[in-house]
Amino acid sequence: MHSSKIVGVGHHVPEAVITNQYLTTIMDTTDEWIIERTGIKERRWIDPSKDTVANMAAKASRIALQRANLTEKDIDFIVFATITPDYFFPGSGVLLQRELGLDGSIGAIDIRNACSGFIYALSVADQFIKTGMYKTILVVGAEIQSTAIDPTTRGRNTAVIFADGAGAAVLQRSDNPGILSTHLHSDGNFAEELYVRDPGSSRPREERQPEQILDTTHYKVVMNGSLVFKHAVVRFLEVIQEALAANKMSKEDITLLIPHQANLRISQFIQHKLEFSDDRVYNNIMRYGNTTAASIPIALSEAWGEGKIKENDVLCLAAFGSGFTWASALIRW
Ligand code: COA
């Protein structure tokens, strides 16, 4: 059986910085409320005239490839995690393939597991490499949430949290195991606690009048914030412990924990429970908000760029989100 290793990471975020102060001009909220509840100070929103999920993903991917000393032609397969694809279908994986100038000799799939999407994508790619099917896989998480939120007082409980960005990792066959293990979970009983109802196919045809949908549920993020918070803190800790147990490691073996950037309060709660010092947990939600599937690869790329990840370090990635889904990955760099 082969092993896989991350050989390059990259990220791209849109230029426009949306501060909490700006949000106070378009909805009834305050800088204090947002910082106190979420830790977010600013986030990035796309310019719809130039940014798409696929082209942001392509920018992040090219950086990851360059850092891995590889080119587009080296990619055998694409795994693309997003819940905000450019089109309802096809998925954004094929659009990224086109952006990168790749032809039909390779395949691309989309993963729709929200905030856990990148770890699910990493796990899928890891299995393909382990079995020997592919040698080099591009794993991407990219989202445009700013066009899916309701940027008014009506949507303020989610509009202040979710944001845009893209991150990528190149996974390659390796003699030294990099991805030590991945752990995936879901519980669909909580599907409607954090979801976007439309344009879902379950909506009856007679209810599909554009004005009816636009005014109610189309693109509207519905979130039971306190329930999400309660489950997240439990599941994050469980899935981190599961990863450690599977590798016969203890929490002391983790050099750096990179949690999905859901909410700074969630990350701080986990840090406190694990009794980790600040330098062992990477957070950038203050600058980027919650970018769903893009949050972990953006954080990974940024932490690597800041010199916070060194050879042989043990990283733990952990995520929780819509579904509910939750997941972890233990990685030796
Ligand atoms: N600005 C100002 N007030 C806001 C607001 C905003 N952006 N959003 C909601 N409020 C108001 C509510 O209307 C409510 O007012 P009321 O008491 O008059 O009814 C009040 O603030 C408290 O709302 P509530 O939803 O109970 O706040 P909360 O303490 O649960 O915090 C979250 C809300 C979303 C920050 C919190 O539940 C949370 O962080 N949950 C986890 C969310 C998450 O991580 N999601 C991503 C998962 S991947």
Image (spheres, helix red, strand yellow):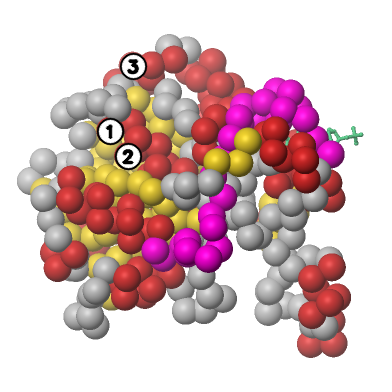
The residue beneath circle 2 is 301
- Circle 1 crowding by C-alpha within 10 Å: few under 14, some 14–19, many from 20: few
- Circle 3 crowding by C-alpha within 10 Å: few under 14, some 14–19, many from 20: few
Which residue: 33% across, 61% down?
58
Residue 325 appears in the picture as rendered: no
Residue 105: quadrant of the picture = bottom left
Would you say the residues marked 1 and 3 are in contact, meaning their CB atoms lie under 8 Å apart?
no
x and y percentages locating residue 16 in the rendered image = 53, 46
Would you say the residues marked 3 and 2 are in contact, meaning their CB atoms lie under 8 Å apart?
no
- Answer with the quadrant where ligand 1 appears in the image: top right
Q: Is residue 253 left or right of residue 237?
A: left
Q: Which residues are magenta?
A: 28-55
Quadrant location of the N terminus? bottom left
The residue beneath circle 1 is 305
Would you say the residues marked 2 and 1 are in contact, meaning their CB atoms lie under 8 Å apart?
yes
Q: Is residue 164 left or right of residue 214?
A: left
Q: CA distance from mark 2 to mark 1?
A: 6 Å
